[in-house]
Amino acid sequence: MIERREFLRAMALAAARPARAQGNRAPNIVFFLADDLGWGDLGCYGNARIRTPNLDRMAKQGTLFTQFYASGPVCSPSRCGFMTGRFPGRLGIHSALGPNNQERGQADFLDPQVPTIARVLQQAGYATAHFGKWHLGDGEKAPDPREYGLDERITANTNDNTWNKRDPYFRANSTSLIVDAAIGFIEKNRERPFYVNAWSLLPHAPLNPTDEQMKPYRQLGPAGLPYKGALEVYAASVTAIDEQFGRLMARLDALGLAGDTVVVFSSDNGPEDIHLREASHSGVGAPGPFRGRKRSLYEGGIRMPFLVRWPGHVAAGRVDRTSVVSGVDFLPSMAALARAPLPAGLEADGEDRGRVLLGTPAPRSKPLFWEWRLSVFGDTMHRSPMLATRSGDWKLLMNPDRGRVELYDIPRDSLEVNNQAAARPDVAERLAGPLHPQAGRNDYPWPGGK
């Protein structure tokens, strides 16, 4: 007997197909996510050393956003925000999921009952797939990614790590495998709307590019010495992503699907620090002009590249320097572009920024929040307070005990070096929220006093 859920889904698919056959097809969505790529690692974001011709071409074909924020400064929280539209802390995800979840006071995996963008689109008739890094539940006890609304998946950092990681060049060539899977899925489902996550494992450390990948960057290495330099290792890994991304885009174009497909490119968090042991040979990614790296709540840890292409809908060659967009906006925005209904009772922390993506800059109606409970590697200038919020032009950082209160006017001080907390206590207090004088006290009026 067919389960009721499967029956309803089949009926939804059948109801959706006639409208698409009449030329009213909802757009395909391809979401390509890099891992630990910095805001300043692409040519279109100002990098003069790393070659990224395909992503630079996408920026010319679509719109580049300069104020896009991931939902966390590390992998799992950021990915949770993209998939659910909710701040990851609400769902018990505070750091990278792994064997030490209990020590970090967090869930072992994303609750599969939480609505995801994949399930929203699947229920609207989309074919859905995820290829590459998952990191929303790692290990045998974690749910299969298909429980989150995915028809197909080939994954790493999940309950079933399919690829052979014993190959010393697995990571170096992994983006090719991810793109192969994505292209195959697209070709198979080209006659209906599809949603594909292509989530790269690069340039997350450790990095070991092949000799062929290293060739364009020998000039960045130590001259006359037999070892590789950090710059050439990192640059070769980023260009490897760009080459495979270009192959995916070329296939979309060759299939005649470019005009029907929203392509989104971003990264999950800022670049890794060279002080981490696994990145000691490669941790030189660029956060651009910003303070902070991975794990930091300063801009360099959470402000990411964000490119969107949809020919005929998203303006070509446009740069949006004013609109603040976040990973938690991904679910409501993509659902709106796909004309897919949101689940009843969904309490999204993000907002529909579809009009912004299509070319109408607009301020946010909701503030953004971040947390980081653990240490921040590297230089002291990157070591942010534990909490942060962005509302309008202002960004407040502080510790839970209200220590280290820092306030920055981000459009005018994106380097976060001019702390305005003392000069603008009204703004700092408004963003921090009121603190009742009795909060945290347990005084008792003892007879005769203490």
Image: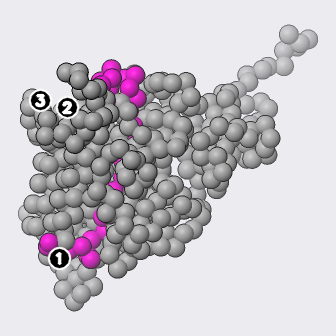
Label 2 or label 3, whichever comes before in sequence order: 3
Rendered image quadrant of residue 245: bottom left
Query: Image quadrant for the N terminus?
Result: bottom left
Residue at coordinates 43% horizontally, 51% vertically from top-left?
Answer: 46
Magenta part of the chain: 254-282
Is 355 drawn above or below residue 407 in the view shown?
below
Distance between mark 3 and mark 1 Cα atoms: 37 Å
Distance between mark 2 and mark 3 Cα atoms: 8 Å
Asked whether 274 falls inside the magenta stretch, the response is: yes
Res 268 visible: no
Residue with the mark numbered 3: 168
Q: Residues within 10 Å of mark 1 (few under 14, many from 20)?
A: few
Is 84 drawn above or below residue 340 in the view shown?
above
Question: Could you say where residue 210 lies in the image, as x and y percent from the top left?
Answer: 14, 36
Question: Could you say where residue 76 lies in the image, as x and y percent from the top left?
Answer: 36, 39
Asked whether 260 falls inside the magenta stretch, the response is: yes
Of badges 2 and 3, nearer the viewer stands 2
Is 396 drawn above or below residue 8 in the view shown?
above
**Is the Cβ of the residue at disc 2 closer than 8 Å to that at disc 3?**
yes
Disc 3 is placed on an element classified as loop
Rendered image quadrant of residue 124: bottom left
Rendered image quadrant of residue 77: top left
